């Protein structure tokens, strides 16, 4: 699997040291929502990012092992250890 990051993937990972909603990524990355969504999907496929959902019962974010790729705004995102390693080694 390709562990190289393009400029967009690097910018997205730069926002995800902590759990962030899709809208926050839109504020920080100067691309269209569709381009950012595609970048996130690529990062998830590379296992560099995980989708997170707010769990009301636990009052915290939990990893969402399934996500709706047509509704990226419904989730928040966080970089994985591998994602942070790739980001920091660039």
Image (cartoon, rainbow, N blue to C red):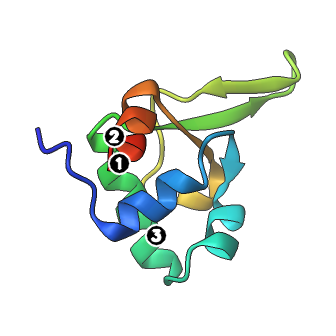
Is the residue 51 above or below the residue 15 in the image? above
In terms of sequence position, does the residue under pointer 3 or pointer 2 come before the other?
3
Query: How many other residues sit within 10 Å of disc 2, few (<14), some (14-19) or many (≥20)?
Result: some
Disc 3 secondary structure class: helix
**Toward which corner of the image does residue 44 lie, by quadrant?**
top left
- Closer-to-camera residue (20/11): 11
> Which residue matches tag 1?
43
Looking at this rendering, what residue extends furthest in the left direction?
1
Q: Mark 2 to mark 1: distance in Å?
A: 11 Å
Q: Which mark is residue 55?
A: none
> Which residue matches tag 2?
86
The answer to whether residue 70 is visible is no
> Which residue matches tag 3?
36
The x and y percentages for residue 14 are 54, 54
Disc 2 secondary structure class: helix
Residue lying at 36% horizontally and 53% vertically, measured from the top left: 41
The x and y percentages for residue 72 are 54, 58
Residue lying at 59% horizontally and 47% vertically, measured from the top left: 16
- Closer-to-camera residue (79/34): 79
Looking at this rendering, what residue extends furthest in the front direction?
89
- Closer-to-camera residue (71/59): 59
Tally the marks.
3
In terms of sequence position, does the residue under pointer 3 or pointer 1 come before the other?
3
Kindly check if marks 3 and 1 are in contact, taking CB atoms under 8 A apart as contact. Answer: no
In terms of sequence position, does the residue under pointer 2 or pointer 1 come before the other?
1
**Toward which corner of the image does residue 15 lie, by quadrant?**
bottom right
- Closer-to-camera residue (84/70): 84
The answer to whether residue 5 is visible is yes
Identify the image quadrant of the N terminus: top left
């Amino acid at each position: 699997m390709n562990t190289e990051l393009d400029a967009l993937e690097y910018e997205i990972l730069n926002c995800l040291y902590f759990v962030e909603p899709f809208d926050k990524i839109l504020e920080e990355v100067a691309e269209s929502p569709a381009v950012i969504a595609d970048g996130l999907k690529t990062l998830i496929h590379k296992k560099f990012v995980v989708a997170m959902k707010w769990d009301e019962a636990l009052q915290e974010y939990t990893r969402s092992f399934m996500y709706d790729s047509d509704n990226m705004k419904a989730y928040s995102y966080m970089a994985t250890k591998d994602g942070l390693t790739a980001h920091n080694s660039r």
